[in-house]
Image: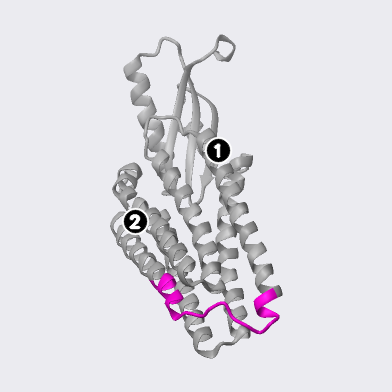
Amino acid sequence: MSTNVVDRLRGAYRGFMYSALFSALGLILEVVVFLLWGSIILFTDIIHWTVDTVLEIFGFVAIYYAIRVGRRFPWGVLVLEGAVMLLSITMAIGIYMVSFASYMVTEYTAGSVTTNNILSASGTILGGLFTLLAFIVQKKNYEKFELEVLKIDYTHALIDLIAAIVSTAGIIAVYFTRSSNIEILFVFISMTFIIHSLIEIMRDVVKTITGTNIDHELSIKLYKKLIGEYSNIVVDDVVARKIGSFYTVEAKIGVEPNTKISTVHRLRKKIIKSIIEESGLIYHVEVRIYPIPARKRK
């Protein structure tokens, strides 16, 4: 792997942008098709798309800030974004549960189906095509840049592609059989994909909001490494935080007040290199250097 993770992230950044764009377009198209022809299976897939789009946007923004070398990682912005996304998902799930309850009371108990037009399958087919594009783009990016976050993204796209195929098969099967039991079966299958996506986003977003995304083991390991490699500085604190599949690291370093600016810049670059070399999953490093207070000097 290349020693400069940031350069590879910048090269792969366009792929993340396309992935988020494909997800948003797929969601919009499915909503349009649902408004035209309906189907509870398609509606369930739309909720899945909504959760995934939120996840893609969250990851996209995190990567955007990770490649801004030399700038402080804006955790406040990420926390606010996470809170808005959780609220959006909660509202979407709430709307779906009300609609699903209505479906169970009316259509399912009466033995009728909501999938009355085979054109409802065009929504899941179009969504699947956008998912396939995202898979192809991110897999090629992974082969080129060898970043774990790309592998996770294209693997998730593959799971979403399977979900689109299952939903399409369900719509076609219900249209020809007119079976409410088959329809509810495929609804429950689609729900498993929603649960899978919810687990991912709840794990990442909630930890970011609550500040529990600190990896103490990696933080201590980096702290000891810097102490062992640099004897002329004071390693005040090292904190490694995990966002999805990658880490950001913040190191607070004390130096003598009379240290030259040029020396500080060189030291900062060396420390960043030392930290990144520890793990290929560390994508952003912020080194905050300050003059050592009198009480800390020996």
Picture quadrant where residue 83 is located: top right
Which quadrant: the C terminus? top right
Q: Residue at x 59, y 75 (%)?
A: 187
Out of 199 and 142, give the one closest to the viewer. 199
List the residue tagged with mark 2: 146
List the residue tagged with mark 1: 80
**Closer to the N terminus: mark 2 or mark 1?**
1
The residue lying furthest to the bottom in this view is 177
In space, the residues marked 2 and 1 are separated at their CA atoms by 30 Å
- Region in magenta: 106-125
Q: Is residue 230 visible?
A: no
The image shows residue 154, relative to residue 58, as above or below, that is: below
How many badges with numbers are in the image? 2
Q: Indicate the secondary structure of the residue bearing disc 1.
A: helix
Q: Residue at x 43, y 59 (%)?
A: 28
Q: Residue at x 54, y 33 (%)?
A: 76
Q: Indicate the secondary structure of the residue bearing disc 2.
A: loop
- Percent of width and height locating residue 94: 65, 57
Out of 77 and 88, give the one closest to the viewer. 88
Magenta-drawn stretch contains 110: yes
Q: Residue at x 57, y 15 (%)?
A: 296
- Percent of width and height locating residue 221: 54, 41
Out of 167 and 267, give the one closest to the viewer. 167
Q: Residues within 10 Å of mark 2 (few under 14, many from 20)?
A: some
